[in-house]
Image (spheres, rainbow, N blue to C red):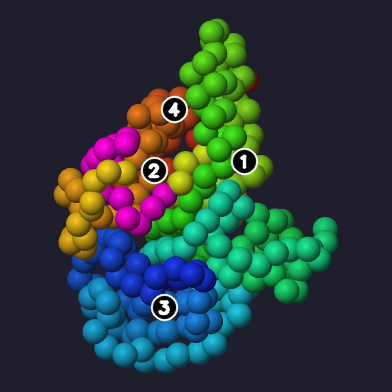
Amino acid sequence: MSIVIYIRGRDNSLEWPWYFAHPRKRRVGTDLYYFDYEDLELREYKDWNGSLPPKSTPDRVSSIAGILDLYSFIGHQRAGAIEELHFFTHGWSGGPVLRNTYDHFATASDRDPNDMDPRIYDFRLTTVLGGAARGDFAKAFSRSALVKLWGCNHEEDHRQFIKLKFFGATTDAERDAAKNEYRFHIREGTYPYALAMAIRLPVYAAPLGWGTSPFLPFGIEGRAAVRTKAKRRGIFPPAKGDMWWRVSPFFRPERGDQFYRRELKARTDILDYVAYTESMARHVP
């Protein structure tokens, strides 16, 4: 059986996966696992047919605590089993927000035992995914798996950096230096990049510096998007004006898409989420 995993973070709508998940298709030989970090429950839907929401009650419900439960679950699946992994929750450059906990007591060799959220250093710590467990974690993903973090990556300094340091540059040398500095921040400071390197697959996430919202109209950019009342149809791909969880409507007007596609050679999906890969963040001499 193939596996699809949906994840809901604290203070996020229970229905968002049903509204926005894609691709929306009929499934055969697929099990759906819903990690609900609001209710701290894992709900299993065996032999799921792809209906959103699932038409049946869960086949099994069990308790979960934090991100380590998800890592362990993935690491115990057979090779190539996971076809999709979606985080439908708030986010920042440091990763998806599951319970909005803190890592006050983290050390160089272990996590804070009270911290329930993903951290970039999870992929370096030998007690998490920086050691032997990393191989099993990575092997569980199909080589064509869709991995997506739907939440924000909005930290204004990075957004302004592109505007001022790259598009405001006056020489090629200044522009090249700006690109490499931005690439450094992706490599060293973003969870989607760390996850992509761990599983050796593209990880789709918001571009560094921009937010996302589940209430925006598709295909309308800039201030017009903020003024437009979106309609939710739940049909993928969305039509113009449909409400969908997408990247900021200012990403394109501010030429962020141009920077990512032309300068970093990155792929973006229909909703402007960026495919984090090694090549798009590699330092260029």
Cβ atoms at labels 4 and 3 below 8 Å apart:
no
The label number, if any, that marks residue 59 in the structure image: none
**Could you say whether the residue bearing mark 2 is in a helix, strand or loop?**
loop
Q: How many marks?
A: 4
Give the spatial CA distance, label 3 vs label 2. Answer: 29 Å
Q: Quarter of the image for the C terminus: give it.
A: top right
Q: Which residue is mark 4?
A: 259
Mark nearest the camera among 4 and 1 is 4
Image coordinates of residue 169 in percent, x first then y, are 54, 13
Mark 4 or mark 2, earlier in chain:
2
Give the spatial CA distance, label 4 vs label 1. Answer: 17 Å
Mark 1 or mark 2, earlier in chain:
1
Amino acid at circle 4: Phe
Q: Which residue is mark 1?
A: 187
Give the spatial CA distance, label 4 vs label 3. Answer: 36 Å
Amino acid at circle 1: Arg
Quarter of the image where one finds residue 112 = bottom right
Give the spatial CA distance, label 4 vs label 2. Answer: 15 Å
Q: Which residues are magenta?
A: 212-225
In reply to whether residue 219 is colored magenta, the answer given is yes
Mark nearest the camera among 4 and 2 is 2
Mark nearest the camera among 4 and 3 is 4
Residue at (46%, 55%) from the top-left corner?
151
Q: Which residue is mark 3?
A: 33
